[in-house]
Amino acid sequence: MKNITILLFAFLVFLGGCANNSSQEQKKQEKEKQRKMDSLALKIAVTPTLDCLPLFIAKERKMFSAKELDVRLMRFKADMDCDTAFISGTVDGMFSDLARTMRIETKGLPVQYLSVTNKSWKLIANRIARLKHTYQFNDKMIAMTRYSAIDYLTTKVFESVKLKDPFYRIQVNDVAIRLKMLTNNELDAAWLPEPQATMALHRKNNLLSDSRDLKVSLGVLAFRKKSFSIEHKKQQIKVLAEVYNAACDSINKNGLFAYSAIIKKYCHQSEDVAASIKYDKYQHITSVSNESKALMQKYLGSN
């Protein structure tokens, strides 16, 4: 009887070991399957800004899945974080600005542009500082990011302004923190994209400059050039362009208010802000102009 009990115990241990090995093997297979799916997916870095809205809509309205396209939107708080992911190869593409992407190219990473975007920036002054003109910026602080479109815009806006004391360019990468510092009276002014710019204006801060008045388009949707040499990635980008165009058509037809819940989810702004944003028509996929590239080349050459 004792021997039978020992044998039965040994048999149960053996079965448990087999089950455990089977479970571990299954987990290993699932992990490998997920790794392959991740490597095949098209990964795009996005920030909480309205230039990314066509892809936010495509994700939420299942426009990607309708085309059997696996797109992963990798959400970051700052353009600098997008740059890091792009350079490391964590993402295939990103929404950015032409100054940033061309600077990345000078560091040795080939970049290919899918399209310009409607990204724009506003220079907004803290209402407490009572700044209404650029000539008032003696010894003032402007929040922006170095080696970027808004660094270029700062130079452009102030190039003909004579100041007794220079202003200070304060590096604040996270756009949400930039907005918070402006509204908390920690800065004199800040460059903000949408929808953060509209939120700042809702709080009675002063608009000093709008990049759209300079008639230059610097927002871009860019990819690592290597992605276009991989056939399945190249096909994914082609389908992505179709989805992007369709989403732009939807925005232009229905207005931002129709997507206020999506804007709230991805951009962390209230729905009433979306309804009051004054925005340009969303363009279909459009090539980056040689004029814009030459402009940024000149800017980068002097910095």
Image (cartoon, helix red, strand yellow):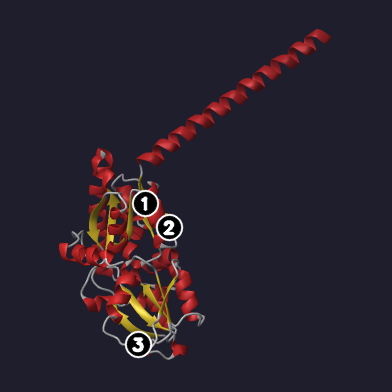
Is 88 left or right of 12, judged from the image as shown?
left
- Which residue appears at 36% of the width and 55% of the height? 59
Identify the image quadrant of the N terminus.
top right
Disc 1 vs disc 3: which is toward the camera? Answer: 3
Q: Element type at marker 2?
A: helix
Q: Which residue is mark 3?
A: 163
Residues under labels 1 and 3: Cα distance? Answer: 38 Å
Q: Position of residue 211 (x, y in %)?
A: 28, 76
Marks counted in the figure total: 3
Q: Amino acid at mark 2?
A: Asp
Q: Position of residue 219 (x, y in %)?
A: 28, 65
Q: Residues within 10 Å of mark 3 (few under 14, many from 20)?
A: some
Q: Residues within 10 Å of mark 1 (few under 14, many from 20)?
A: many
Q: Amino acid at mark 3?
A: Leu
Point out the residue furthest to the right here: 2
Q: Position of residue 226 (x, y in %)?
A: 28, 43
Identify the image quadrant of the C terminus.
bottom left
Choose the circle earlier in sequence order: 3 or 2.
2
Residue 273 can be seen, yes or no = yes
Q: Which residue is mark 2?
A: 81
Choose the circle earlier in sequence order: 1 or 2.
2
Q: Pointer 1 and pointer 3: residues touching (CB < 8 Å)?
A: no
Choose the circle earlier in sequence order: 1 or 3.
1
